[in-house]
Amino acid sequence: MMENKYYTPSLEEFHVGFEYSYKSNLWGYLDCTKGYWALVEFSAGSSEGDLSEIQMIQNAIDSESDDIEVRVKHLDHEDIESLGFKLVSSDWYHNNNDENPFQILKSYNKENEYHISSGTHEHNKTLFNGVIKNKSELKRLLKQLKIID
């Protein structure tokens, strides 16, 4: 079982559309209410003040200070369901499309490891087997596999 629901991402994980949360203990920084986490999508655009979004993220990742913090939620049940899959049993999800069925199976023995397949549960074709750390990674992968638009 995962010890922490969140982790600090590396800068390499960021791409346009990447979902992350940040918290600022500085008043008015990046439209974040002091001391509260804000969920945002990375846009690679500029932010308020003198720092760009990417500079703010890099500073938060590198800093030992709690003035600005960045975190990402590990992939979980709600994330998978929000992308059109339903829990069938235990850690097995199905997209409920009889004409073009896809499944996602979470590994029992490896953290963040998932198996994505097409076809029926009995007769399926593996499309992906590996680590998916967060919702943004799953969403990107499902688009690459042409499972979602």
Image (tube, helix red, strand yellow):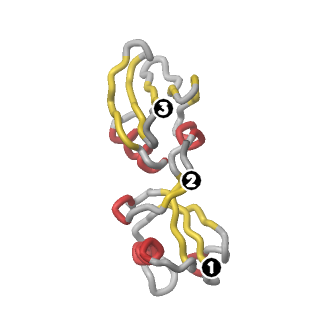
- Tell which tag, 1 or 3, sits nearer the viewer: 3
CA–CA distance between discs 2 and 3? 17 Å
Q: Label 3's element?
A: loop
Task: Report the residue at 41% width, 74% height from top.
Answer: 58
Quick one: quadrant of the N terminus? top right
Place of residue 108 in the rendered image (x, y in percent of width and height, measured from the top left)? 48, 32
At label 1, counting other C-alpha atoms closer than 10 Å, the crowd grade (few under 14, some 14-19, many 20 or more) is some
Q: Residue furthest bottom?
A: 50
Q: Nearer the viewer, residue 131 or 127?
A: 131
- Residue 46 in view of the camera: no
* Figure quadrant of residue 101: top left
Q: Label 1's element?
A: loop
Quick one: quadrant of the C terminus? top left
In the rendered view, would you say 54 is above or below 86?
below
Place of residue 29 in the rendered image (x, y in percent of width and height, measured from the top left)? 58, 80
Task: Report the residue at 55% width, 68% height from top.
Answer: 22
Specify the amino acid type for callout 1: Asn
CA–CA distance between discs 1 and 2? 22 Å
Q: Which residue is mark 3?
A: 108
Q: Which residue is mark 1?
A: 25
Specify the amino acid type for callout 2: Asn
